[in-house]
Image (spheres, rainbow, N blue to C red):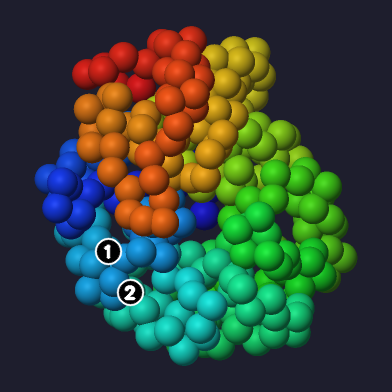
Amino acid sequence: MRGVWTALVTPFNSKGAIDFPAFEKILADQKSAGVSGVIPCGTTGESPTLSLTEKQELIRTTLDFFKGSSTLVIAGTGSNSTSEAIELSRWASDVGVAGVLLVTPYYNKPTQAGLEAHFRAVADAVKCEVMLYNVPGRTGVSLTAQTVASLASHPKIRSIKEATGSTQLSSEIIDALAHSKRSIDILSGDDASFVPLLSIGATGVVSVTSNLFPRGMVAIQRAFEKGDLAEVKKLQARYFPLMRDLFIESNPGPIKFAMSKMGFCENRLRLPLVPVASSTESKVEESMARAGLRKGEPA
């Protein structure tokens, strides 16, 4: 898996239901921007508050929208229940996703042996690729480099979304993979560390901010691949304040606010998440202005 993958927000209407017209507007912008792929039903999509039926509707809608295009779809199907993760992952695999994104089981706090058994059980059950998702700030548990290298022996486990923001851990994963003579793609799962991780061998990013400025994120990836480091530096300077400020409060609160300001969706979240504070709104709006983002203009 290479390039920019957008972890999609899930828009809601005034009745609290999924706003599918708004969702398809977001999908159209992603397609126009040329992202490598999109990921419905991840943390950014408020997956903990989505029912099974809603997840399936979002995944089907996304697949139907991109049918016949070069934009791939990975479905967020992780759970802290292995049986539930297997059920949704198998379904998503059967309906045609390119891969499934599996978060480390939250709250249970399994050992490394438990994590490995969990991921292998799901990978054994699907026909598509598996992307591991390491985000200890959300789950309370982190994969070690050694466990990632061990999991890389599974033919379906081909990438990892590394969301600790730590270049050291990614470097340790790269070293452990080299030592074991295995390989998987490492993608940044933390927008602010996108460029630093590219510099040590990451192949792309699973991005929250690319909901808002997908063309900017794609431009960073392409400039890096061309070796145009001056352009990378310029783009990083332009967008970094937003990469930072969109995480002042719990994701997806800030990105939902920003998307509403750009006219993509309403600023609605499902409890226990609530709209961001006015102080956060001010900081996000300031960073949007610094980045040159304006409603109605592709970003």
Marks 2,1: beta carbons within 8 A? yes
Q: Is residue 109 left or right of residue 80?
A: right
Compare residues 54 and 211 and report the one nearer the observer. Answer: 54
x and y percentages locating residue 142 in the rendered image: 72, 65
Locate the C terminus by quadrant.
Answer: top left
Q: Earlier in the sequence, mark 2 or mark 1?
A: 1
Which residue is at 60% across, 83% downward? 118
Q: To which residue does mark 2 refer?
A: 92
Locate residue 108: give its quadrant: bottom right
Which residue is at 69% across, 50% downward? 164
Dot 1: few (<14), some (14–19), or many (≥20) neighbours within 10 Å?
many
* Label 2: which secondary element: helix
* Label 1: which secondary element: helix
Count of labels in the image: 2
In the rendered image, the vertical position of residue 66 relative to residue 96, given as above or below:
above
Q: To which residue does mark 1 refer?
A: 59
In the rendered image, the vertical position of residue 191 relative to residue 5, given as above or below:
above
Measured Cα–Cα span from mark 2 to mark 1: 8 Å
